[in-house]
Image: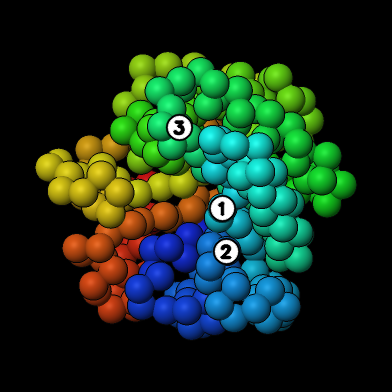
Amino acid sequence: MAVDGLSINLATVREQYNMRQAVEACLKHDILAIAPWRDQIHAIGLSEAARIVADNKLQVTGLCRGGMFPAADPAARAAAIDDNKKAIDEAAALNADCLVLVVGGLPAGSRDIRHAREMVADGIAAILPHARAASIPLAIEPLHPMYAADRACVNTLEQALDVCDLLGVGIGVAIDVYHVWWDPKLEQQIARAGASNRILAHHICDWLVPTTDLLLDRGMMGDGVIDLKRIRRSIEAAGYHGPQEVEIFSSGNWWKRPGETVLSTCVDRFRSVC
């Protein structure tokens, strides 16, 4: 029986498997939804990745990732837009539910976060017609404020939804609990996102205390302090009932364990604590 409602972001087992091997391992655990990363797709080729998805009737809950729009000069901003259009085409080839956008931080030498956010909105606006034509929704993923300078200057669900409201149809949000669990406006903004059908993805893991690495020490669900069930209730009350996508970056722990162990633990924790 399929593990209904569970997706595995393939970053979770990126050190153990390539994309083909990860799919085989997921299938052994009756997991029928995945979210690959572009480098994993490029390593085996887009046509082969698309064949694997189609042959196994997999749901692709998202393609990671587009974004990284701010840059110090027009040529670099144009290159980012071109790369995002390629990412949209890749997402379409995989019949992905969305393309996840990690929008980018401050350009080199800049201290102007407001201008960086303007470049994000301008960059998304530039690719949105291409995404609409390909029927690929764009999912802004707000990242924790600790990443505001280098990875994402959109840091709350409220900020992401403001961009969505500005740009209109074809854009929504990916709600990653690691990045938004702390936000006092979270439930209010989840409801707002649901009212406009903006929720495109729901990513899960846990926040460890202490956290030893801000990027590569995410916890397995149940090992940290995030109230996963409460957030899930809020997201489902807002109308989103798609899979919960496990996305764990863990260089010191889960990336060192056998892939079978990681996936079986994901299934067990999804059933017990999510």
Quarter assignment of residue 129 = top right
The structure residue drawn at horizontal position 60% and vertical position 49%, both measured from the top left corner, is: 66
* Sequence-wise first label, 3 or 1: 1
Query: Mark 2: which amino acid?
Result: Arg
Label 2: how many Cα within 10 Å (few below 14, some 14–19, many 20+): some
Give residue 138's position: percent from left, percent from top.
Answer: 68, 42
Q: Which mark is residue 38?
A: 2
Query: Mark 1: which amino acid?
Result: Arg
Whether residue 152 is visible to the viewer of this picture, yes or no, is no
Nearer the observer: mark 3 or 1; the answer is 3
Label 1: how many Cα within 10 Å (few below 14, some 14–19, many 20+): many
Q: Looking at the picture, tell me which residue is in the foreground, 138 or 5.
A: 138
Give residue 238's position: percent from left, percent from top.
Answer: 58, 28
Total number of numbered discs in the rendering? 3
Name the residue that disc number 3 marks: 106
Q: Which mark is residue 122?
A: none
* Sequence-wise first label, 1 or 2: 2
The structure residue drawn at horizontal position 42% and vertical position 79%, both measured from the top left corner, is: 17
